[in-house]
Structure formats: structure tokens, C-alpha cells
Image (cartoon, rainbow, N blue to C red):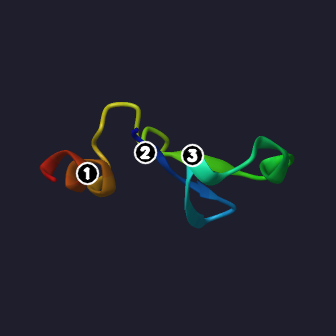
């Protein structure tokens, strides 16, 4: 099973353990969020792993 890391209101969490009902009206950022072209340093670090 894989999980996608995400941020909910700026706090890191895993999508597989986050109920949808707990993120209603909150800001959600996925790994794709910082840059659509993968240019953000976080995305580059993710690829390097």
C-alpha cells in the first residue's frame, strides 16, 4: 500500500490515515502543489529519494 504525504493547514500528515471529514474547509497541499513542473526544492528532494 502506498500513501501520499500532504499538508493540512501547513502540518504534515499521510493521506491514508486522514479522513476526508477532518479536512473540510482546510488548506490541503500535495507534493505537486508547490510547483506544477517539479521545480520546488521539496519536489526535487522527493525525486532524489
For the point 86% across and 48% down, which residue is it?
Answer: 25
Residue 16 badge: 3
Instruction: Please tell me which of labels 2 and 3 falls first in the chain.
Output: 3
Q: Position of residue 41 (x, y in %)?
A: 27, 56
Alpha carbons under labels 2 and 1: distance apart: 8 Å
Count residues near mark 2 (Cα–Cα under 10 Å), then give few for <14, some for 14-19, many for 20+: some
Residue annotated with mark 1: 46
Q: Nearer the viewer, residue 16 or 26?
A: 16
In this picture, residue 46 sits left or right of residue 33: left
Q: Nearer the viewer, residue 3 or 31?
A: 3
Of circles 2 and 3, which is in front?
A: 3
Q: Under tag 1, what secondary structure?
A: helix
Residue annotated with mark 2: 31
Alpha carbons under labels 1 and 3: distance apart: 18 Å
For the point 46% across and 44% down, which residue is it?
Answer: 4
Count residues near mark 1 (Cα–Cα under 10 Å), then give few for <14, some for 14-19, many for 20+: few
Instruction: Please tell me which of labels 2 and 1 falls first in the chain.
Output: 2
Q: Residues at badges 2 and 1 in contact (C-beta under 8 Å)?
A: yes
Q: Position of residue 15 (x, y in %)?
A: 57, 47
Residue 12 badge: none
**Residue occupying the far top of the picture:** 37
Q: Residues at badges 1 and 3 in contact (C-beta under 8 Å)?
A: no
In this picture, residue 46 sits left or right of residue 49: right
Q: Under tag 2, what secondary structure?
A: loop
Instruction: Please tell me which of labels 1 and 3 falls first in the chain.
Output: 3
Alpha carbons under labels 2 and 3: distance apart: 15 Å
Q: Position of residue 21 (x, y in %)?
A: 84, 45
For the point 30% across and 38% down, which residue is it?
Answer: 38
Q: Quadrant of the N terminus?
A: top left
Count residues near mark 3 (Cα–Cα under 10 Å), then give few for <14, some for 14-19, many for 20+: few
Q: Position of residue 2 (x, y in %)?
A: 39, 40
Amino acid at each position: 500500500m502506498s500513501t501520499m504525504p500532504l499538508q493540512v493547514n501547513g502540518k504534515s500528515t499521510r493521506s491514508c490515515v486522514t479522513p476526508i471529514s477532518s479536512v473540510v474547509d482546510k488548506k490541503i497541499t500535495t507534493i505537486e502543489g508547490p510547483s506544477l513542473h517539479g521545480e520546488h526544492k521539496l519536489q526535487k528532494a522527493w525525486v532524489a529519494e
